Structures are given as C-alpha cells and as structure tokens.
Image (cartoon, rainbow, N blue to C red):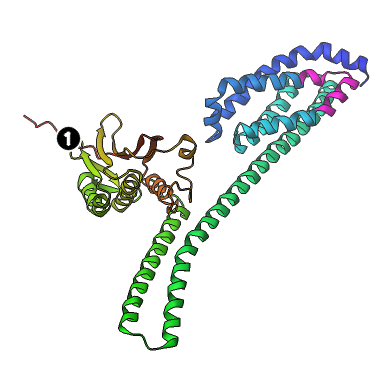
Amino acid sequence: MSDEEWISVRDRWLSPLLVAAEEIVELHMQDMLSFGEPISRYYRKYQQQQRIGVHGLLTEAVQQLFAEEGEYTVYLQALPRKSYKWGERWAKEEIPKEVLLEAMHNLRHHAYEGIRRACTEALAREELLSRLHDVLSVRYHHTMRGYLASKDQKISHLHQQKMGVIGQMAAGMAHEIRNPLTAIRGFLQLMRKSLELEAPSPADRERFAKYIQICQHEVQTLDKLVTSFLILARKNEAANSRNEIVELHPLLERVHELTMHSLIEKDVHLSFHYSPEQVRVWAIPSHVEQICLNLMQNAIDAVDTNGIVRIHTRFFASESTVSVTIEDNGCGISEQRKKHLFEPFYTTKEKGTGIGLSVCKKLVEEMGGQIEIYSTEGQGTRVELRLSAVVPAEPACLAR
C-alpha cells in the first residue's frame, strides 16, 4: 500500500482496533489466570502489573501497524534490540520461562483472532495481519534471545562461583590432610630406621608405643576430617525426614560430661539455665549432640582461664520452637570475621580446621532448624540454635 492508502486505512480502522485491543487483553488475562502452576500463580501475584504491561505493549503494536512505510521500517529495525533488552530484564526479574513462553504464545493467538474479527475489510485486514506477524515474530525471537542469554550468563557465573568454592575446599582439605600424614610418615620413618640398625631395645619399644599412639590419634583426626567433609558435600535432606522426639536437657548433660576435661583444664565456670518446661524437640539426636559439642568446645576455646560459659534453653510457644543458647565472655569476633564463620575451612583459631561451624550449619538445616551467631569483639559470643518444639496436645474435655 502507498502512504496515502495507509492513512486512509488508519482513519477507518485504528480506533476500532484500539477498542479490540482492550478485549484481547481481557481474553489473554482470563486464559493466563486459568492455567496451572506456575503460570496462574505468577499472574495472580502480578495481575495488575501484567494487565498494564500487556495493554501498553499491544497498544503500541496496533499503532505501529498503521504507520507509514518509512516510519514502520524504522520501528521494525529498532524492535530486535528493544525486545532483546526486555528479555534480559525479564530474566533478571526471575520470570519463569513457562510463564514467558505461554504469555507470548497466548497473546499472539488472541491478537490475530481479535484483529481478524474487528477488521472486516479484506485488503486492509490482510495487510494488517501481515505486519502483525512480522512485529510479533521479531519481538518473540529477540525477547527469547535476550532471556536465554541472560540465563546463560547467570549459569556461567554460578558455575564459576561453584568451581571457586570447590577449589577453596579442596585446598583446605589437602592442607588439613597433609599435616597428620606428615606426622604419621615421620614417625614411621623413625621406627623403620631404628629397626634397620638393630633389634629394638625395651626403651625403643616404649618409644615406639608412643609413636604408634600419636599415629593412631592422627588417623582419628583424619577420620573426623573426612566425615565432616562428607557431611558438607552431601545433598540436603528434607527437613524432618529423620527427625524424632529428643529430650533436650538430658542430651545437654551428656555434652557437659564430654567437655568436662576441657572445662577442668582451663578452670572454666559453666552454668545452666534451663526452661521450666521439660523441653522436647523434633531433631536427629546425633546431630544435636554433635552441634552442641562443637559449640561448647568453641566457647571453651574462646575464654581465658577462669572464663564463663552459659547454656540457656527457652520454649517459644507462639513459634512452636525451642532455643539452645551457648554464650561466653571470651575474645569475641570482629564484624569482618563474622561474615565468614560458616564458610568451610575458615577459622579464627590457630589450630582450627575451619570445618566445625560449617558442619553445624549443615546439620541444623537438615533438621529444619536455624543457627545464628551474635558477637562483639572483646566482649564475648552468643550462639543461638533454634529447633521445632514438640508441642504437647491439649487434654480433651471429659464427657459428662
């Protein structure tokens, strides 16, 4: 068509098609809200924004269908870049791909049908539908290119982060394994050289027994290290999958017994402040014991001789949770270090492995709990563990 013919078509059909656009938007919204998850959920959540956005997009497209040839060509040339940017934006806004694909397909269907019904003039309808096909095809193609490119970039970034973490963990693991192995290798070499020279004397036997004891201790250290590493490496288990009812106070008494030697050695004063209720939690007993033992040992390590460590338990009826708080009056932790405490192989101790707290966090998450650390440098540290409480059932009323 010539520009004069397009002007004539626009005068006759622009207003009717803008009215038809309102109906197209409504039909599109009805369809999207009636689909299954995640499409309907997304459209319910952002219904008003989607309605406004789709209406603006469709109104712009309808107006461009009636543009003169030169103006239409310029619009079509600029559309790929504009659509690509929209795709990138929607990817960053985490719009699910199912929603994006179905939305574009559905809107395209209703736009074709709506314009076909609204425009009764055959020649004008044919030209308008041809332009509509070009506009929507370009928009669809380049929107998806932008969306997928942004997703690929994010996946690549996450992969690089993952490989960085794996490298860091591997380096830390290698360092921690090398130390015990060096000690074991050294003592074995000493014993071998002694045996090569002459038969072992009683003094040699006694010395060898000490060497063997040290080697056994180092092997146990390696075993604990590998066990902790495997805990970090395994996939998250569903919360409560292995949880059972755990009596918390008797378990804490066992932890007290296991740390008794360290408490006496540093002359640390330990006090308990238990909840009046006999608190019970949904948890994995071995997990809770390992977590509390680790936190207790950290508190003991942090305080000086004659330091103070306190353990509190508290029941929160409104949240159906129980907290176990372990606090000390030790050296505390700086804000900068606090950010990294749960990272594998990050440690503030001279002889620490840096695995303890990361394992604690992993075990807590497997039970569906939470762990938080509050600390002020020079004043001490408080660690709070939250677990789901076993809430006693209310007694049923007796029938009269």
Q: Is residue 194 left or right of residue 147?
A: left
* Dominant SS in magenta: helix
Numbered disc total:
1
Magenta stretch containing residue 63, yes or no? Answer: yes
Considering the numbered disc 1 on the image, is that residue within a helix, a strand or a loop? loop
Frontmost residue, 283 versus 397:
283
**Would residue 255 be visible to someone looking at this image?**
yes
Frontmost residue, 235 versus 187:
187
First to last magenta residue range:
62-78
Q: Position of residue 326 (x, y in %)?
A: 30, 40
Q: Is residue 381 left or right of residue 70?
A: left
Which quadrant is the N terminus positioned in? top right
> In the picture shown, does residue 56 fall above or below 284?
above
Magenta stretch containing residue 355, yes or no? Answer: no
**Would residue 133 be visible to someone looking at this image?**
no
Frontmost residue, 102 versus 228:
228
> In the picture shown, does residue 90 fall above or below 212?
above
Q: Position of residue 24 (x, y in %)?
A: 66, 22
Q: Based on the displayed image, in which of its 4 quarters is residue 157 positioned? A: top right
Name the residue at 65% across, 46% down. 156
Q: Based on the displayed image, in which of its 4 quarters is residue 396 positioned? A: top left
Frontmost residue, 204 versus 369:
204
Q: Which residue is mark 1?
A: 276
Name the amino acid type tagged 1. Pro
Q: Position of residue 311 (x, y in %)?
A: 26, 40
Q: Is residue 350 left or right of residue 37?
A: left
Name the residue at 76% across, 22% down. 61
Q: Residues within 10 Å of mark 1 (few under 14, many from 20)?
A: few
Q: Position of residue 127 (x, y in %)?
A: 84, 25
Q: Is residue 380 left or right of residue 70?
A: left
